Amino acid sequence: MPEGHTIHRLALDYADRFSGTAPRVTSPQGKFSDAAALLDGAELTRTDAHGKHLFLGFRDTDWVHIHLGLFGKVTFGGRPAPPPTDTVRLRLANESAYVDLRGPTTCALITDAEKGAVHARLGPDPLRADADPQAAYRRVRGSRTTIAALLMDQKVIAGVGNVYRAEVLFRHGIDPYRAGRDLTPAEWDAVWQDLVALMREGVRNNRIDTVRPEHTPEAMGRPPRVDDHGGEVYVYRRAGLPCHVCGGEVRTAGLAARNLFWCPACQPA
């Protein structure tokens, strides 16, 4: 599932190509046809993102709410647009560009009030200007749940996925099995600020890079990481390999139906 930086990047990309235009809106697959007909030819006025939720604003009060889930995919292209396949849930097309949405968990036309309800059920997003990190910490410090599980709970903090979860805990030497209530205010502040910086870089570069300058392939004289997810990381999907910092073995285990990655030496219990 895409992490929050990808959704914020999509919001920027939709705005760059379609904001201020009145695109053709269609649903070749048919599942969004009624809503597409209502939006066809309406101006795209703004875009928004919160965690893993994307919002496309049309006119003054209409929003398309998109959640990609595990299988959703967005494809941008220039004109002329090719004939859409019958897997395209939503296509936007104007004189210069088109974008296809396939396989989302959610693609729905909603009102301002309904959009507000989505925001209300989500935790603060490190990429949003209105984020309150202390609201997230109040939940963390009152919980016996592991910090690794709390970071993946979208009601606690929105947008963090498995990669950022593993990497930020490593970068701060925090045992992923520590209870949230044992995380000090200083540790939480450091984790939050690091997430803000890392995720902003993810938006800029459209990939996740978490290693510090001294641990890049060039600095260490090691081969670059080869992985579908791209980016240089410390522990994510590196189980059984030597840690870039201490040389110990990176470990993995299941936690809350997701794979957890950490270095026991650098993140001691």
Image: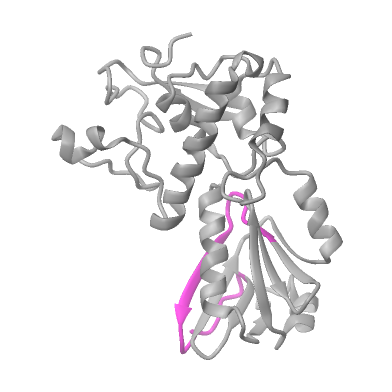
* Residue sitting farthest toward the right: 113
Position of 221 compared to 119: left or right? left
- Residue sitting at x 67%, y 24%: 140
The residue lying toward the viewer, choosing from 45 and 260, is: 45
- 230 above or below 104? above
> Does 36 lie within the magenta span?
no
- 97 above or below 171? below
Count of marks placed on residues: 0
* Residue sitting farthest toward the top: 269
- Colour scheme in the image? one colour
Instruction: Residue 117 in the image: state x and y as whole percent.
Output: 83, 52
Position of 14 compared to 122: left or right? left
Instruction: Residue 209 in the image: state x and y as whole percent.
Output: 36, 43
- Residue sitting at x 56%, y 15%: 177
Q: Main secondary structure of the magenta part?
A: loop
Instruction: Residue 36 in the image: state x and y as whole percent.
Output: 74, 79
- 173 above or below 67? above
Position of 200 compared to 68: left or right? left
- Residue sitting at x 43%, y 19%: 173
Instruction: Residue 8 in the image: state x and y as whole percent.
Output: 55, 57
- Residue sitting at x 53%, y 66%: 12
Q: Is residue 2 visible?
A: no
Position of 167 compared to 221: left or right? right
The residue lying toward the viewer, choosing from 82 and 221, is: 221
Q: Is residue 220 visible?
A: yes
> Does 85 lie within the magenta span?
yes
Magenta highlight range:
66-88
